[in-house]
Image (cartoon, rainbow, N blue to C red):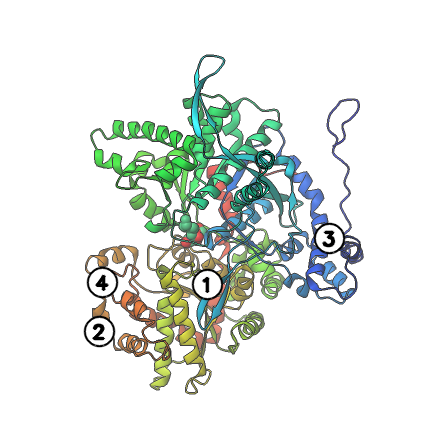
């Protein structure tokens, strides 16, 4: 950057915003395509996408630079969202919407005989996440930019994102997702801000100049972290925030040593090993597998990001660490990055020379932790041996944190050894572990759950001891989703229709959707008809996708009944499939009273090591094959399993859905966010009293929501004497369904493959209680069928769902995080 020759101050370059008319966009596009990429007429589609992406990135650049500079103003407090996952999906449509230049771009592309839609289809999803937690991080980033909040995301630039799912003979097959194969035109590599991350080695005591004993971490194996920045544009507000993703690379001198020793091959191997760290996203979304590489990823992210945040702060001329916590806050997305608690202590003590107590005060004032799950198998804990070998200095710090913490516990509850055992960050036993959630709670000033029920269950159950010690740390932040991607971008028809009635202010302030409520109330026949026409068009779009990807014909006049999410027993895709079989049997047995034609869509990925989830996918496909091809069914019932469910599929699915399936066992789904995407797009929910479903029902009214099933307390109580055979005995519908599966009707060529499923749901130890909710679910589905036949009544419910969804915008969620946790000033410009 040039300096002012007189004052010596940096003078920002003058950058003119680029013109946004179709002509300017078209000529930039052509310049990139031909002069930069070297492609000409009739070139293959990935290059048109790439050239257009560069054209649009240029149009974000001035705002990006200005936002960055404004955030760096001295004294401005900043938040950093640390997450192992950012499930961003595609960027192009989102930036076009935010910049407000979709029509101009559309027009420009037509000059090149391309439709914008075709070009956008070329973009691979950035699938750097598993499911809800990763997508939430992406929605948060969107809202922070739209609210001008100075928040930067820190994550990992995985070379391979979430695997691609194929279906082969009904079984899931995983394929690597090399999303970076054609390059990523949105990102900017900033080698100059690389960080060095240490592993292994040992710690060593020494005396500093003042004679104090200090520790240094020596003989380490280092890995470089190279940042790649992705622009996060705000909605029409000249704001572009940054998502900084770290790539791992070998350090130069590490290679050099090996080279000098003459072992060229060894050097290249070492380079490879270092780069492994950012190679692949772990595809488990609810059970930890304790793999070393995963702990390496976690520390890599935490260490690189904290050093980067410290660098940014110091570059501002700051060095009075008493102010560090006034100006920096780190939100940890689940326990995955919580080694950051110990790493910040290490930086402050070992690298900045602070004393323990001062460093601890700062750490506890900077760190905030969000929990996303109550499932015990998802709570991360790392074997001590592994920790000791990989991060010896961090383990020492954790021991010290724990010792001081347990002293505090014993002061509050003298002699309560059991409680000390429960609360210890180190789990004792044959194998000893570091409990990452405990480390996070002890090191943070804020601990939150992601829906009202979930936060309540954390306080009453999992974190109860900690809640008794520090009630003030605990709070709830109900999740949301961004209405820009999930309504304005995904559902342009509905967006236009709503805006003719209430203007378009709702896109930036979703509470305004409440103004639609009067249009839901009787007599608005034109609006009702328009609303249905939009839904019908969206259903035609989804039907085309289902036809292309599953070969199944969905009739857009039928009820579209959809469950898309990760495949997990607690989410109970099985309950859904049992219901489909029940409907099939009704056709076969001629019980057609209160019948409505239905198209049932199921989609989602199973963790590659989760055998039961994979078998559930096989069952869905097997049932689909029978139902869809039985001439007796004659199109009145369809079932399709959509392969490779991902962000860009949801953009087609949510706008086309009539019934949203949110049927987890009560108390198990922390929040759910798909439920919110469906609601915003006018779907009606059939759901259990779980997660954010409860808040959805409160918002829309119980009469516009199909509630069923056991409540959390009932589930817990029933566990003690659960006898699933009773339900089978009492319910002939259930019995017939189970018998049909057992008979091999759906798997004549592969006998017994579904026994593991029927055994699991008939076991008294089934934690998910599928059979206990079967009857209530079938009855609720029958109420759905009744409601569907009243076309106007259904339309009214649909409109009311959209009109009541204002609360579920991540804009609201982010404003709550900001008001109660981060306390940032929006950037003014
Ligand atoms: C360590 C393996 C692992 C990986 C991911 C364990 C657990 C996870 C996440 C907690 C899984 C997840 O995505 N949780 C979901 O988070 C969403 C956003 O808050 C919630 O809406 C979902 O209910 C919750 O399941």
- Rounded to the nearest angstrom, the CA distance separating label 4 from label 2 is 16 Å
What residue would you read off at disc 1? 604
The numbered mark, 1 or 4, whose residue comes first in the sequence reads 1
Residue at image position (52%, 46%) is 276
What residue would you read off at disc 2? 730
* Mark 1 C-beta to ligand 1 under 8 Å: no
The numbered mark, 4 or 3, whose residue comes first in the sequence reads 3
Residue at image position (27%, 58%) is 715
What residue would you read off at disc 4? 764
Could you say where residue 395 lies in the image, as x and y percent from the top left?
Answer: 39, 33
Q: Which one is closest to the eye, mark 1 or mark 2?
A: 1
Residue 308, compared with residue 751, is above or below; it is above
The numbered mark, 1 or 3, whose residue comes first in the sequence reads 3
Q: Residue 370 or 524: which is nearer the viewer?
A: 370
- Rounded to the nearest angstrom, the CA distance separating label 3 from label 2 is 65 Å
- Rounded to the nearest angstrom, the CA distance separating label 1 from label 3 is 34 Å
Q: Which one is closest to the eye, mark 3 or mark 2?
A: 3
* Mark 4 C-beta to ligand 1 under 8 Å: no
**SS state under label 2:** helix
What residue would you read off at disc 3? 55
- Rounded to the nearest angstrom, the CA distance separating label 4 from label 3 is 60 Å
Which quadrant of the view contains residue 419?
top left
- Determine if residue 264 is in view: yes
């Amino acid at each position: 950057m040039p300096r002012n020759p007189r004052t010596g101050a940096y003078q920002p370059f003058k950058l003119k915003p680029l013109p946004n008319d179709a002509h300017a966009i078209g000529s930039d596009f052509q310049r990139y395509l031909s002069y930069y990429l070297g492609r000409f007429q009739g070139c293959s589609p990935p290059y048109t996408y790439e050239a257009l992406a560069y054209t649009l990135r240029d149009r974000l650049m001035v705002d990006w630079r200005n936002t960055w500079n404004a955030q760096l103003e001295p004294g401005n407090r900043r938040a950093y969202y640390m997450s192992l996952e950012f499930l961003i999906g595609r960027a192009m449509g989102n930036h076009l919407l935010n910049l407000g230049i979709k029509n101009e771009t559309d027009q420009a592309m037509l000059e090149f005989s391309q439709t914008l839609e075709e070009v956008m289809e070329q973009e691979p999803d950035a699938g750097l996440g598993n499911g809800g937690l990763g997508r939430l991080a992406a929605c948060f980033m969107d809202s922070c930019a739209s609210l001008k909040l100075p928040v930067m995301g820190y994550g990992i630039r995985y070379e391979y994102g979430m695997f691609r799912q194929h279906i082969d003979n009904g079984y899931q097959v995983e394929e690597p997702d090399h999303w970076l194969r054609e390059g990523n035109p949105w990102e900017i590599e900033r080698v100059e801000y690389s960080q060095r991350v240490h592993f292994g080695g040992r710690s060593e005591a020494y005396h500093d100049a003042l004679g104090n004993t200090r520790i240094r971490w020596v003989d380490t194996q280092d890995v470089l972290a190279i940042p790649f920045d992705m622009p996060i544009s705000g909605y029409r507000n000249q704001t572009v925030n940054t998502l900084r993703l770290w790539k791992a690379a070998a350090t130069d001198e590490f290679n050099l040593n090996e080279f000098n020793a003459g072992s060229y091959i060894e050097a290249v191997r070492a380079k490879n090993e270092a780069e492994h760290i950012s190679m692949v996203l772990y595809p488990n979304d609810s059970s930890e597998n304790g793999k070393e590489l995963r702990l390496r990823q976690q520390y890599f992210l935490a260490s690189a990001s904290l050093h980067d945040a410290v660098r940014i702060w110091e570059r501002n001329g700051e060095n009075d660490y008493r102010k560090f916590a006034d100006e920096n806050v780190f939100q940890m997305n689940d326990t995955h990055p919580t080694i950051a608690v110990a790493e910040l202590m290490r930086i402050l003590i070992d690298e900045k020379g602070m004393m323990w107590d001062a460093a601890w005060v700062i750490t506890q004032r900077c760190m905030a932790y969000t929990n996303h799950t109550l499932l015990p198998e998802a709570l991360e804990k790392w074997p001590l041996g592994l920790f000791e070998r990989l991060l010896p200095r961090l383990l020492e710090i954790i021991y010290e944190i724990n010792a001081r913490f347990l002293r505090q516990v014993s002061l509050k509850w003298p002699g309560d050894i059991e409680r000390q055992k429960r609360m210890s960050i180190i789990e004792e036993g044959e194998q000893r572990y570091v409990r990452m959630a405990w480390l996070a709670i002890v090191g943070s000033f804020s601990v939150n759950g992601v829906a009202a029920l979930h936060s309540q269950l954390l306080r009453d159950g999992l974190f109860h001891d900690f809640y008794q010690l520090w009630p003030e740390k605990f709070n709830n932040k109900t999740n949301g989703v961004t209405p820009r991607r999930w309504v304005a971008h995904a559902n342009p028809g509905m967006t236009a229709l709503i805006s003719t009635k209430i203007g378009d202010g709702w896109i930036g302030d979703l509470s305004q959707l409440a103004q639609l409520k009067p249009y839901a109330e009787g007599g608005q026949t034109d609006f009702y008809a328009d609303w249905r026409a939009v839904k019908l068009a969206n259903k035609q779009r989804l039907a085309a996708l289902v036809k292309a990807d599953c070969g199944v014909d969905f009739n857009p006049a039928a009820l579209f009944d959809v469950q898309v999410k990760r495949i997990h027993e607690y989410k109970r895709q099985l309950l859904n499939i049992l219901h489909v079989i029940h409907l099939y049997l009704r056709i076969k047995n001629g019980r057609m009273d209160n019948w409505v034609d239905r198209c049932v869509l199921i989609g989602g990925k199973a963790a590659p090591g989760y055998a039961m989830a994979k078998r559930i996918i096989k069952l869905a496909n097997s049932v689909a094959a029978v139902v869809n091809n039985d001439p007796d069914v004659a199109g009145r019932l369809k079932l399709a399993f959509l392969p490779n469910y991902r962000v860009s599929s949801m953009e087609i699915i949510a706008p086309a859905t009539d019934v949203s399936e949110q049927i987890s066992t009560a108390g198990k789904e922390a929040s759910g966010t798909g439920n919110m995407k469906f609601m915003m797009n006018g779907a009606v929910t059939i759901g259990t009293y779980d997660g954010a479903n409860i808040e959805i029902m409160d918002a829309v009214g119980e009469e516009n929501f199909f509630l069923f099933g056991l409540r959390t307390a009932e589930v817990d109580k029933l566990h003690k004497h659960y006898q699933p055979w009773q339900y089978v005995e009492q319910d002939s519908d259930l019995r017939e369904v189970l018998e049909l599966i057992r008979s091999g009707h759906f798997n004549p060529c592969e006998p017994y493959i579904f026994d593991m499923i029927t055994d699991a749901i008939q076991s008294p130890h089934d934690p998910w209680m599928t059979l206990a909710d079967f009857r209530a679910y079938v009855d609720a589905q029958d109420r759905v069928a009744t409601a569907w036949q009243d076309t106007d009544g259904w339309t009214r419910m649909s409109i009311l769902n959209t009109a009541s969804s204002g609360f579920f915008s991540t804009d609201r969620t982010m404003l709550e995080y900001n008001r109660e946790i981060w306390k940032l000033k929006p950037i003014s410009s």
